[in-house]
Image (spheres, rainbow, N blue to C red):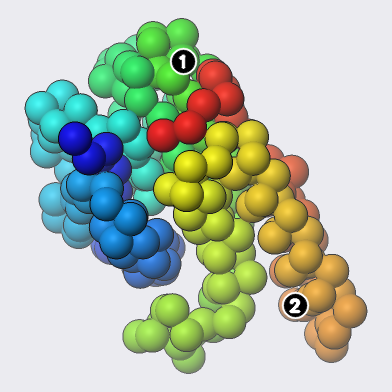
Amino acid sequence: MSKKILFTRPEHDDTTHYLSNWSSVPLRLADKSGFKVIDLHRERANKDEAESIIKKQNPDFIVFNGHGSPDSVTGDKKEILIQVGKNEDVLKQKITYAIACSSAKELGPKSVEAGASAYIGYDDEFVFFYDPNKFSRPLSDQTAELFLEPSNRLVVSLIKGNTIKESITEAKKRFRENMIRLLSTASSPQDASMARYLWWDRQHLTFSGEDVTI
């Protein structure tokens, strides 16, 4: 039986527009690699549908794209999907990666306490820049690529059968490479600022739970 990957991809603001479009890259790879892909896109990334699908379909790996806080991760129109003290137990026996701010700080450890295999995410803000001129074509945005390609690389690495630690190492390596490349060609204060936030994202990428594969 094929293993299952669930993606939530809200698109209600600039941030989620970019995260959703960039997440389509590993989503397509998962599909080509033989996984059963469940895509909660746009309005489908709501609490009721997410909870129902997770319980009924029992995905092995969940990728949340959205906004977050230390104790929660959100979906469409910032509706809270998973929150500490309310429903973190739905992540039981699953690997989760939240491409969102801060949720690895509290939600990650609490979900593992409630039985999750692992929770990967950022224990502070996840920052990325983008080029407004490329908003209608986010996958051609080389500024956003500096941040979102390393984040995607973690998902791709897991899809290819690597462990969580190996996949995090791969993503952090790419963040570092992009930072060094940007600093070597920096021509503006914005370039220097972007390099600083590449390092920031690298430092705040973490996980709780077991070092497992999908």
Query: Residue pushed farthest front?
Result: 1
The answer, for residue 172, to whether it is visible in the render is yes
Secondary structure at badge 1 equals helix
Q: In the current view of this chain or complex, which residue is farthest to the right?
A: 184
The kind of residue tagged 1 is: Val
The image shows residue 108 at horizontal and vertical percentages of 50, 24
Give the label on residue 190, or none: 2
Whether 122 is drawn above or below 126: the answer is above
Residue 194 falls in image quadrant: bottom right
107 over 66 or under it: above or below: above
Q: Residue at x 27, y 52 (%)?
A: 34
* Quadrant where the N terminus is found in the figure: top left
Q: Amino acid at mark 2?
A: Gln
- Asked if the residue at tag 1 contacts the one at tag 2, i.e. Cβ–Cβ closer than 8 Å, the answer is no
Looking at the image, residue 11 sits to the left or right of residue 206; the answer is left
Name the residue: 58% across, 29% down.
207
Q: Nearer the viewer, residue 74 or 116?
A: 116
Count numbered badges in the picture.
2
For the residues labelled 2 and 1, the Cα–Cα distance comes to: 38 Å
The location of residue 30, given as percent across then percent down, is 33, 55
The answer to whether residue 51 is visible is no
Horizontal side, residue 139 vs residue 10: left or right: right
Left or right of 166? Residue 72 is left
Per the image, label 2 sits on a secondary structure element best described as: helix
Query: Residue 19: x percent and y percent?
Result: 41, 61
Q: Earlier in the sequence, mark 2 or mark 1?
A: 1
Query: Within 10 angstroms of label 1, few (less than 14), some, or many (20 or more) residues?
Result: many
Q: Which residue is found at the position 53% from the left and 50% from the top?
A: 157
Location of mark 1 (residue): 112
In front of the other: label 2 or label 1? 1
Tell me, for residue 132, which label it has, or none: none
Instruction: Assess disc 2: are there few (<14), some (14-19) or many (≥20) residues with their C-alpha within 10 Å of its C-alpha.
Output: few
